[in-house]
Amino acid sequence: MYRGSVRTVRRTGTLILASLLGLALGGCGSAGERSVDASAAATEFERLLSSADFKGLCAALAPETRSELAESEKTSCAEAIAAQDIPFGGAVRKVDVYGRQARVVLESDTLFLSQFRDGWKVVAAGCTPRSGGLPYQCTIKGG
Amino acid sequence: MRRFVRENGLTLSFGIAFLLALAGHAIAGHTEFNNQQAADGLAQIGLGDYLMSSDFAVDVTENWQSEYLQFFLYITVTVWLLQRGSPESKEMHKAGKESDKEQRVGRHAREDSPRWAGAGGMRQAVFSRSLGLVMGTIFVLSWLVQATAGVSAYNEQQLRQLQAPISWGAYVGSADFWSRTLQNWQSEFLAVASMAILSVYLRQRGSPESKPVGAPHSATGVEG
């Protein structure tokens, strides 16, 4: 953090400026694509929920959420998720994607998702907001 | 080649040190990011993905903006503010923009002066402030990137904790943004103040940032 010579930095100004802009634009990269993918994963989760495909629902969960659910209910994931009161969310109303995390707000539910190697997985479902900036209250969640 | 290296040693060595430090930061930051992902039961990411992440961008640019702010302020404030006895300051009677003759501009430009120093009007006005303008512009851009990458990194953390994301406007008024900003600014201001006053009484033989070892403490604007 020490202030070095002014002359040292002047020549590299243009290069650094270009790097800055590249970093800024690069960071914004494929947010649109990720948003579409997260939305599609949420829609698929809702389809599995409406058709009571519990094995499919478990496959759509993030690993930590899946194991947390099975451990807390002391049974298989499919049986455990069948016993949960996860509301049917309906159509997607809003998608927020930041980095590898997403929040998908549905007509009657909110899902939190995270990006894994094999696509977007549901980290938490059956979520309702709480006041005061507190975390959402969720029916199922990992960790 | 050898001559080029000798004549540009300062820029080259700091440029290389910058790249090495940035590479080290990338590796350490990537490891730290993945540690956090593992703790939350989330997927690990590759180094390439980390380098394109808002997490890396905000960490880099919060330091860049403060460094360029420091240079911008130092360059512009030392036009008017003085420090008796410091080689970082002009002499006591030279506060201000100085005369055209002292600055070798307009009709006082010499054969070897940059072309825009001799030109009048806008070109001379711009060139006379070009160092501050470039430093100030890089500062503003870096700070904007910090704010933009910062809200993304902050919201990623919010979503990880099952909390609602916030808008860019809310973020630039948030504790996270100002904590990142001011923690860097305070260290820059301390370094400048320290350099200005310590160079009055202390010496570094051979350094142009110091007065000659035998120069009196009261000598101002003298570089070694």
Image: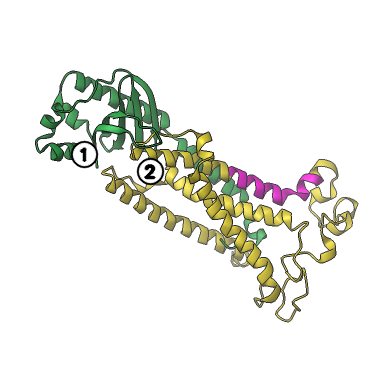
* Farthest residue, direction left: A75
Check residue A15 for magenta coloring: no
Provide the residue designation for mark 2. Answer: B49
Q: Is residue B161 above or below residue B130?
A: above
Dot 1 alpha-carbon crowd within 10 angstroms: few under 14, some 14 to 19, many 20 or more = some
Q: Amino acid at mark 2?
A: Asp
Residue A83 or residue A17, whichever sits in front: A83
Q: Colour of chain A?
A: green
Q: Quadrant of residue A142?
A: top left
Q: Colour of chain B?
A: yellow
Q: Position of residue B28 (x, y in %)?
A: 39, 56
Q: Position of residue B73 (x, y in %)?
A: 68, 54
Residue B158 or residue A60, whichever sits in front: B158
Q: Position of residue B194 (x, y in %)?
A: 63, 67
Residue B178 or residue A33, whichever sits in front: B178
Tell me the magenta residue range: B124-141
* Farthest residue, direction bottom: B214
| Identity of the residue drawn at 68% across and 57% down | B74
| Identity of the residue drawn at 28% across and 38% down | A116
In three-dimensional space, the C-alpha distance between marks 2 and 1, rounded to whole angstroms, equals 21 Å
Q: Amino acid at mark 1?
A: Pro
- Say if residue B102 shows up in the picture: yes
Q: Is residue A20 above or below residue B211?
A: above
**Quadrant into which the C terminus of chain B falls:** bottom right
Mark 2 or mark 1, which is nearer to you? 1
Pointer 2 indicates a residue of which chain?
Answer: B
Provide the residue designation for mark 1. Answer: A63
